[in-house]
Amino acid sequence: MIRKLWPYTAGYRKWILMGVLCSGAEAVFELILPLMMATIVDTYIPAGDTGGILRHGLLMVLLALVSMGLGVCAAFSSARAGQGFGANLRDAQYSHIQDYAFRNIEKFSTASLITRLTTDCNTMQMTLMMSLRLLVRAPVMLVSALVLAMGISLRLSRVFLVALPLLAVGIFLILSAVAPKFRLLQERTDDLNLTVQENLNAVRVVKSFVREDFENQKFEGRNLALRSISETAFGRVIVAMPTMMLITYGTIIAVMWYGAPMVQSGALEVALLTTFFTYITQVLMSLMMVSMMLMMLTRSVACGKRIIEVLEEKPDITDEAADPFAKAADGSIDFDHVWFKYNAASEAWNLEDIDLHIKSGQTVGIIGATGSAKSTLVQLIPRLYEAARGTVRVGGRPVGDYTMEHLRDSCAMVLQKNTLFSGTVRENLLWGNEHAADEEIWAACRAACADEFLHRLPGELDMDLGQGGVNVSGGQKQRLCIARAILKKPKVLILDDSTSAVDTATDARIREAFRTQLPDTTKIIIAQRIISVMDADLIVVMDDGKISDMGTHDELMARSEIYRDVYQSQQEGASIDG
């Protein structure tokens, strides 16, 4: 895992090196101070050498200041390295997710991806920051203090032969128990985030169905599950502290027990025994710091694996076979015996043997019952999904011949579930053409019949839409999304039931604008209302993933029972409403 994550320290390795050097040097300077104090107590104080006491005292102050400076430098360097490492990880994940196909995104839940980009990355950057401080400082202090303690008394140092193995065994047992819990902890965090995200995204539905209590219960259940696993994981970690302190103080008592007779016999000086106590504490505390870092590393391993899963996920659709210079000659579309299914392991096909040929500039309507795979069909055109069998062509070439950037730039798609982003109306419309002048923007708005309400909005194009376009209605949102697509001036324009929230008169005006302003653009209109497609050059009737029939309105009325039944039912409904 270190090998896979190391490249993301790029740009911050000098800070890692500086943190390591400063942390190690700080530990060495701290270890020198007890020896200097022992010299003052055993040599200069009994001799009454005031000058020697002052010289060593000032030297100790100087060393303490140097140690403090090194500590500040180590803290700054480790913080800089940790924050930079975390930023690189977030940037790498986010950039890689942008290359995902829909199938890849569906593999991870949105809430899980958010957790991996935030909580998991924060854990990793904190681990690096703490590691530079503790995993360098602690081993240096451990080894140095152990050597200095053995130099004072080899006999007393034998207590480490008992204390160190006991600490090592205790740490191993605790880590073995807590390691599996941290992975589960992150998964429970994903579940909680998913609940919150769903609730906030669908807050209008929740309130309209008066399901607040149900949502509260669902949140409470997942919150309690997270609390339970957190208590279990961190409860076992907390057990480590009293266990280690028990061994530490037991070791100090043992040194007192065996060291006192040595002082009485003159084999060991009091100041050296005191210094030995200091080194005992430093040795055992260093081991405790290492153990705590190992526990943090155990959690970071779980987070690191989740991050690596995102980074190593191979996009389902790539540009590997694409010709970077290929350009779509026109908006013609061909489906040559295309088959598709969302789940490769599923026996049922979502699309079966689709053979459809659309000329450039034609207007094509697609109708069918809910679940007949109308949306699935059009999503193969810009390669949002890849056909399992057969070939989809745009401009006479297979869609795989184009880079996704060019192919999707040649297609504009307006979905039934429209998305507007936080920002102004102008900023949202410029997604279609970031260089569009105001005249072009207003022309697109007039074609989408959006100008009539934009003039009534405060600020017009500069009005802030809020998150997700909460300041406009569903129909207004649809028209803004259509205007955004028109600004793109695409070769293929796909409207997936994107006029469902507008009245029939507005729908007709929008279609008339398509005919007059986009004559060379191939227009594919998925609709539930036959009146929205009855004047199309070609109407395709979908039924259970297959093309039931295709032709003009008159031809389908003559021979398609499905089409005729839908038309008659809608006409009867219109008569009743009238």
Image (cartoon, rainbow, N blue to C red):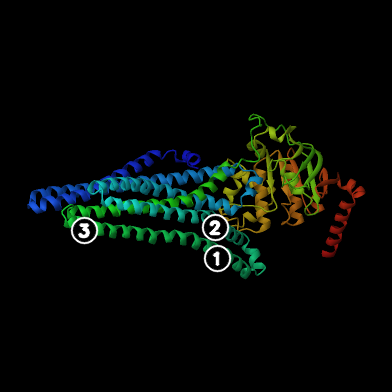
In the rendered structure, which disc, 1 or 2, sits on the residue that comes first in sequence?
2
Q: Position of residue 166 (x, y in %)?
A: 39, 54
Query: Where residue 291 is drawn, which disc sits there?
Result: none
Determine the secondary structure under disc 3. Answer: helix
| 397 left or right of 133 in image | right
Q: Position of residue 44 (x, y in %)?
A: 11, 50
Question: Foreground residue, 493 or 279?
Answer: 279
Q: Residue furthest right?
A: 558
Q: Which quadrant is the C terminus positioned in? A: bottom right
Above or below — where is 12 with respect to 264? above
Q: Are marks 3 and 2 in contact (CB under 8 Å)?
A: no
Quarter of the image where one finds residue 253: bottom left
Q: Amino acid at mark 1?
A: Leu
- Answer left or right for 67 relative to 42: right
Alpha-carbon span between mark 3 and mark 2: 54 Å
Q: For mark 3, what is the residue?
A: 260
Residue in the image at 28% along x and 50% along y: 157
Mark closer to the chain start, 3 or 2: 2
- Disc 3/disc 1 C-alpha distance (Å): 54 Å
Q: Residues within 10 Å of mark 2 (few under 14, many from 20)?
A: many
The answer to whether any part of residue 423 appears in the image is no
- Residue 453 x/y as whole percent: 65, 56
For disc 1, the marked residue is 224
**Residue on which disc 2 sits:** 189
Residue 104 point in image, percent of width and height:
63, 45
Q: Residue at x 20, y 49 (%)?
A: 35
* Rendered residue at 66%/64% (across/down): 205
- Pick the front one: 87 or 255: 255
